[in-house]
Image (spheres, helix red, strand yellow):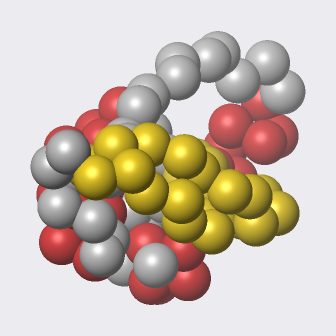
Amino acid sequence: MARESINRKLAFCCWIRPKHVALYTWEGEFCEESEYEIVFKTNSVNIEQLTAFIRDMHPYEAPYIATFQGELLHDDYARWAETNVL
């Protein structure tokens, strides 16, 4: 999913964080799953398309998708990022 988001230029970089255990209830059942967390770095223009892509690709019916907005403080990084997304 991370690689394909970059190939489609929906994200310019992804962090795949180490596997962890998620505990939750789903449809009244207790669940314990091994998961990886992926942080997709993108611009505001691509958020809607990236969200739809994640929902289509993710095996869960209701995956956790959240946004965190930050200001890029390094101009060279910001220019590189913008050249790698749609």
Left or right, 24 with respect to 15, comes to: left
- Asked where in the image residue 19 lies, by quadrant, the reply is bottom right
User: x, y (%) of residue 48?
Assistant: 19, 44
From the viewer's perspective, is residue 5 above or below residue 21? below
Q: How many marks?
A: 0
Residue at horizontal 15 percent and vertical 49 percent from the top: 27
Quarter of the picture holding the C terminus:
bottom left
Where does the image place residue 30, in percent across and percent down from the top left?
Answer: 39, 50
Q: Nearer the viewer, residue 15 or 45?
A: 15
Residue ID at (20%, 45%): 28
Question: Could you say which is closer to the camera, residue 64 or residue 23?
Answer: 23
Q: Position of residue 52 (x, y in %)?
A: 17, 58
Q: Determine which quarter of the picture holds residue 32.
A: bottom right
User: Residue at 46% of width from left, 79% of height from top?
Assistant: 1
- Residue 77 relative to residue 49: left or right: right
Instruction: Looking at the picture, tell me which residue is in the foreground, 56 or 71.
Output: 56
Pinpoint residue 70: horizontal percent, then vertical percent.
Answer: 62, 17
Give the vertical position of 70 relative to 30 (above or below).
above
Q: Can the viewer see residue 46 in this picture? A: no
Instruction: Determine which quarter of the picture holds residue 45.
Output: top left
Q: Residue shown at 44%/28% (left/top)?
A: 67
